[in-house]
Image: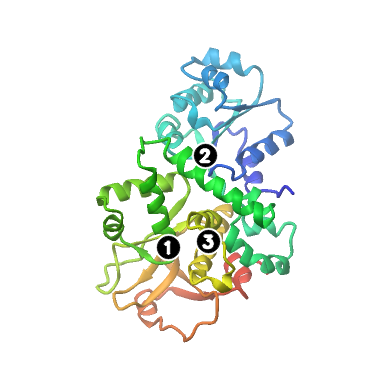
Amino acid sequence: MQIERLLKKSIIKHCFLGRIIILYGPRRVGKTTLVKDIQKESKKKSIYLNCEEPDVNQALTSKNSQELKKYLGDNELIILDEAQTILNIGRTLKLLVDNYPDIQIIATGSSSFDLANKIKEPLTGRKWEFFLYPLSVLELLETSSKIDINRQVNVLLKYGLYPDIYNADFIMAESKLDELSYSYLFKDILAFENIKNPELLKKLLQALAYQLGQEVSYTELANLLNVDQETIQRYLILLEKAFVIFRLPPLSRNLRKELGKKRKIYFYDLGIRNSIINNFNDMTLRPDRGGLWENFCILERKKYLDYNNIRVNQYFWRTYDQKEIDYIEERNNTFEAFEFKYGQAKKSKNYTDFLNAYQNSKITTINPENWLEELLNIK
């Protein structure tokens, strides 16, 4: 079953406005399906090109504008899939948009390693950028009821929301996730930046997976893996650029009791995270269910904000005497805070210090009973 992607309408809206459209997202997240769907709906003459094909890659590498136009013909909509594989892609795209502004180019990239680096300067003021996540709950609600979604929550915490995984049975889901995790580790990340230590990368990901929902110390990771902090930070940046993890910084206004150095690290997909540690147990058997719920809620909130073009600063908050709030959004000097509880809290937390320090604040507890309404505004 193909699920309509929320990003499609936004991309179509930005077409033929004189800029190149860049679509980022992890491998197998549905970028190719999305751009082909856009191509199918377009009334313009179009062409889809897989830039990993050797002949396509060669035809688009180190060519002048006339050679490029001759190759692309009279097509008005041009889709370049996996565009980061083309050498000097930024120059190629700049030549096309400058010389043929009536042509609409959509370029996709499964990592931001080369594509972002090579287009940043050449395409300044010449591009729109979009990011495609794994499926969102908002997208599932187009064909499923709130009751159906709530019944699926524990499955989503185990297997995540990659399109192929969501549509697979449980046995196939685990197998596909293992293969997808492998492609993350070896096809994308190890192929770039001359990463020569796959075992270290695997151990780092496992360490991050086990610390889900906790502050991460670069020093502790370095000591655990017997490497220097510079290597840890370099690998974390690569994992971010490959859309495996994202980081959440602490909120600090230089109050003496607030933590200011550690970060929280979450995964863009929980199925990938669970595959890394080979744990697909039921939620009733999992001591990490609180961290899974926290990751799930923050990730779905990120999707909601991005797809609705809502810009906020995102943090967590914790003090040295262990007072904490899981997730905070700052917008227009106001703070909206969320606490995530998978089960019933043993006792109510005291938020007095936070409310005194940040007086324009609202705090909401998110649990499996109210998450759709309070987190995603689904009434």
Instruction: Identify the mark nearer the N-term, 3 or 2.
Output: 2
Which numbered disc, 3 or 2, marks the residue closer to the eye? 3
Instruction: Please name the residue shown 59% across and 57% down the image.
Output: 160
| Side of 289 relative to 142 (left or right) | left
* Residue 2 point in image, percent of width and height: 72, 47
* Label 3, residues with CA under 10 Å away: few <14, some 14-19, many ≥20: few
Instruction: Identify the mark nearer the N-term, 3 or 1.
Output: 1
What is the three-letter code of the residue carrying label 3? Answer: Asn
- The C terminus lies in quadrant: bottom right
Instruction: Identify the mark nearer the N-term, 2 or 1.
Output: 2
Q: Is residue 360 above or below residue 81?
A: below
Circle 3 residue: 279
Q: CA distance from mark 3 to mark 2?
A: 26 Å
Q: Do the CB atoms of the residues marked 3 and 1 lie less than 8 Å apart? A: no
Circle 1 residue: 210
* Residue 149 point in image, percent of width and height: 68, 65
Q: Inspect this view and state whether residue 377 appears.
A: no
Instruction: Say which mark, if any, is on residue 291.
Output: none
- Between residues 353 and 49, which one lies in front from this camera angle? 49
What is the three-letter code of the residue carrying label 2? Answer: Ser
What is the three-letter code of the residue carrying label 1? Answer: Tyr
- Between residues 223 and 318, which one lies in front from this camera angle? 223
Secondary element at image label 3: loop
| Side of 162 relative to 184 (left or right) | right
Which numbered disc, 3 or 1, marks the residue closer to the eye? 3
Instruction: Please name the residue shown 45% across and 67% down the image.
Output: 327
Q: CA distance from mark 2 to mark 1?
A: 26 Å
* Residue 205 point in image, percent of width and height: 42, 53
Instruction: Say which mark, if any, is on residue 110.
Output: 2
